[in-house]
Amino acid sequence: MNVILNVFTVLAISAGAFFFLAGTVGLLRFPDTLTRLHALTKADNLGLGLIILGLLPLTSGPIQAMKLIGVWLLVQLSGAIVMQLIAQAIRRGGLRE
Amino acid sequence: MTVSLAFDIGLAGLILAIGSWTVFARNAQAAVIGFVAYGLLLAIMWVRLSAVDVALTEAAIGSGMTGMLLLGAVARVRPADGHAVLVNLPGRIVTGLLCGMISAGLAIASLSPPETIRTLAPAVMENLSQSGLGNPVAGVLFVYRALDTLLEKVVVVLALLGIWSLAPDRAWGGIPGLRIYVQPSSTLTLLAQVLPPVGIVVAIYMCWVGAKLPGGAFQGGAVLAAMWLLATIAGLQNLPSIDQFWLRFLLVIGPALFLAVGLAGFVLANAFLAYPDGYAKPLIVVIEVSLTLSIGVALGMLGAGPPERSQR
């Protein structure tokens, strides 16, 4: 059981790290701000979500696990809304590079 | 080479790189954003050094709050045409020299420690139970170095007075001129409605848990201030004018109560800032709660800036 959980942790965290890497590459390589925002949201949502999913078996109890999930939900909320605000600002005012 | 050592070296390199980038950036706004990233990385470094209390404060105050104040300052000094104000050459040289002297002084102080550093950590851990606290950091802050902690809170209020004194005469006692981004049915409104209830619970938790785990008045107060500013920026709530009695009362209640308990220590425990036997924990909790409120209000008003509109 323990081995299965450890394999699960390693797989989930690796997948999460991959999304962060992909998000960073996108941030550096994509041509304009809207597509760069798109790349960043993937890192935030999926990357952090997978890393927290992988960390869940390592927590000492349900309270700690719920705190981790709470962190993920808060990052989702603020991340999604801040991206919206940046995108709105670009749409309204144009963008000075 | 272990993985954690490689991580630490990479992190230290990244911090140095972002630090130098912040110094050399041509654009003040970019430098501030670099400074915020620098603060967040520094917080991770504090966690690596097992100083979680410091990490929380660094992330909340050093990076978040200071970053916001600096961004405000950048916006304030930037003229309307978008060109940076050029300081003349002697001015820049003097500034550079002064900054260099401060850096050199800090570097000398930290690179040449005394031969043997006598750590007081075992003594703190031995006597911690007397205070009823479980977090050694809180024990040091409120019992052994209470005077430092008291002065630290007074400094925050003094900083706010410094900002308020920038107000023009006609606006004195008026409403701080924080720019409000009112966009009907904006996503910002949603965030400002959803997040504060969560944030207030987190702030209370941080303040309460500070007695036995990392957390405390500064961290809780910073979260409170952030929630207040968020609701204000979204236009859901109006800033008070700075001559409101309740505002000034909340600002000083924390330091004043701390000072009162300290003075009472002369009579009850034979020393300034000493707690009477058996009452240490409840007194510290009362002080910490009032300090959290004071710091929250002070940081919020710091972020709101000097008063600009006179009261209607």
Image (cartoon, coloured by chain):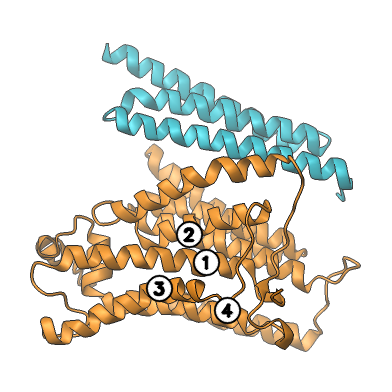
Q: Dot 3 lies on which element? A: helix
Figure colour of chain A: cyan
Q: Are marks 1 and 2 in contact (CB under 8 Å)?
A: yes
Instruction: Give the x, y percent position of residue B248.
Output: 49, 76
Q: Nearer the viewer, residue B288 or A50?
A: B288
For mark 4, what is the residue? Answer: B243
| Labels 1 and 4 touching (C-beta < 8 A) | no
| Mark seen at residue B299 | 1
- Subunit under mark 2: B
Amino acid type for the residue under numbered disc 4 = Asp
Q: Is residue A93 shown to the viewer in this render? A: yes
- Distance from disc 1 to disc 3, alpha carbons, whole Å, reads 30 Å
Dot 4 crowding, Cα within 10 Å, few <14, some 14–19, many 20+? few
| Subunit bearing disc 1 | B
- Measured from the top left, where is residue B169 in percent x and y? 71, 88
For the point 75% across and 51% down, which residue is it?
B182
Q: Residue at x 19, y 55 (%)?
A: B134
First in sequence: mark 3 vs mark 2: 3
Is B180 situated above or below B249?
A: above
Tag 4 or tag 1, which sits nearer the N-term?
Answer: 4
Question: Pointer 3: what residue?
Answer: B110
Q: Nearer the viewer, mark 3 or mark 2?
A: 2
Q: Are marks 1 and 4 on the same chain?
A: yes
**N-term mark: 4 or 2:** 2
| Of the two numbered discs 1 and 4 in the rendering, the one whose residue sits closer to the viewer | 4
Residue underneath mark 2: B222
